[in-house]
Image: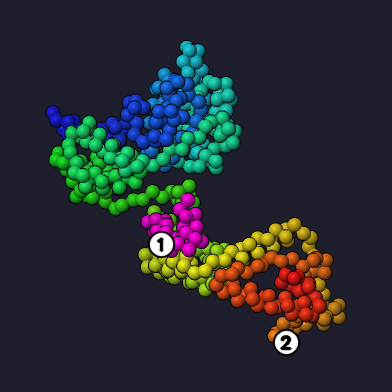
Amino acid sequence: MSSADEFFESTAPLADRMRPKTLAGFVGQRHLLAPGKPLARAADAGRLHSMILWGPPGTGKTTLARLLASASDAHWISLSAVLSGVKDVRAAVTEAEAVQGLGEHTVLFVDEVHRFNKAQQDAFLPHVEKGTVTFIGATTENPSFEVNAALLSRARVYVLRSLTAEDLAVLVDRACEEELGIGIEPEARSLVCDLADGDARRCLNLLEVAAQLAHGTAITEHAVSEAAGSRYRRFDKGGDAFYDQISALHKAVRGSAPDPALYWLCRMLDGGCDPLYIARRVVRMASEDIGNADPRGLQLAMAAWDAYERLGSPEGELALAQAVLYLASVPKSNAVYKAFNTAMAHVKGSGSHPVPMHLRNAPTRLMKELGHGEGYRYAHDEAESYAAGERYWPDEMEAVSFYEPAAQGLEVKIRDRLARLRQLDQAAGSGSRGRSGA
C-alpha cells in the first residue's frame, strides 16, 4: 500500500499526525527555541518553570507544552478550561500528589486558561506555590486582562508568534513527504502558505483537503483554491486582534496615512467586524483627531454612519471608506480633545460653583425680581457682536485656559479670531472674559 493510500485510510487529521515528537522537529518560534533562547535553555536543563504561552491559534502552544514536559521527563496532565471546573482541578492535583510520592514531577497544562474564572484560577495557586505541579497555561487572549494577577505573578509569559511563510513551507513539504506521499507544485505551496495566514493547523487542514482533491497526483494551485473556498483572515471579535486592528486604523487616520487606513478598514470588514462599530469609531476620530481643523470631517463621518444604516452591506461600506479616507487626508488637530479632557478634569476636581446672577435664566417675573439676568450684555447689540470684557465664569473661580486652537486648517482662523477678542478684552480693561482670561 502506498503512503498516499495509507494517508487516505487514516482517520486521524493530518494536523494531528504531523505533531512533532521532539523539540528538534518543532517548526517556528525560534525566538524561544533557538539555541540559547529561554525555552531551549529550560528544556536542555530539564527544569521547567510555570509559564503561560500566549499566541494566535495554530502557533503550537499545546504541542510546545507537551514537548517541554517530555523533555523534562514530567508526568503530563491536561485540562481544557472549556470543559473543566474546580472539581477537575482538584482531581488533577490529587493525581499529581500521587506521582510526586513516587518521585515524579507533574506538568499541569490548561488549554484556553482565559476561560477559567478567578475562583477557578485561584485553585491552582497553592499547588504551584508548593511545587506539586508546574503550571503551563495556553491562551489566545492577553494574559494581562484574562489571567488574574496572583497566578500571573507565579508564571512567566512567553509570546508565540504567527508562523512565517518559510515556517509553513517547511510544514507543507514535510507533510507531503512524510504523510501524504505526493508532491506539490511551487505555486500551490505558496498559495497554501498564504491562505494559512500564519496558522499551522489551518495550513495542514487545507493541505489535507487539497490532497484529497488531487486524487493521488501532485497538488496543484487549482486544488488548493477549490479546497480553500472563501478566503479567511484572522480576526478575533472582542479579542486582542480586534483592538489591535482598530488601534491601527485610528493611528493611520491620525497620522494622515490614507492608504494604510483604508487597508485596516478593509481588514476589519473582511474579518467580520460590525461596520456600525467602525462607524462609531470613525465619528470619534473626527472629533478627537481632526476637530475644528476641519469640522466637515464630523459631518462626513455622521453621514457615512447614516448611509450605512440606510444601505447596509456591502453598499454602505463604501461610505465608511469615503469617511476614513477624508479624515486621513485633511489637517489634524486634537485641540478639542485636549480642551475637553482638561475642562472635565477641572470640573471633577472643583466645587459646584453657582451660576452668576447676570448669566441666569429669567423666564418668569419672580426670577427677574430676584435679579436673574440683571446686567447681562447682549453680544449682538455691541460692536463686532462681542461684549468686550464680559465675564462668563463663576464668581468664585479664576479664568482658566482650556482651548488652544492648533495652527492647522480652519483652526488657524479660529485662533486668529480668539486672539482678536482677547485684544478687545484688554482694551476694555478686563482680563477675565470667558475664553481664556488672557
Q: In which quarter of the image is residue 17?
A: top left
Residue 311, horizontal then vertical, whole percent = 40, 69
Helix, strand or loop under label 1: helix
**Residue beneath label 1, please?**
259
Residue type beneath disc 1: Asp
**Residue beneath label 2, please?**
383
With respect to residue 314, does 60 lie above or below? above
Q: Nearer the viewer, residue 260 or 95?
A: 260
Q: Earlier in the sequence, mark 1 or mark 2?
A: 1
Q: Nearer the viewer, residue 218 or 260?
A: 260
Residue interval drawn in magenta: 244-270
Q: Nearer the viewer, residue 387 or 374?
A: 387
Q: Which residue is drawn at 22% across and 50% down?
A: 226
Q: Which residue is drawn at 39% across and 31% down?
A: 34
Helix, strand or loop under label 2: helix
Q: Marks 1 and 2, how far apart in space?
A: 48 Å
Q: In which quarter of the image is residue 430?
A: bottom right
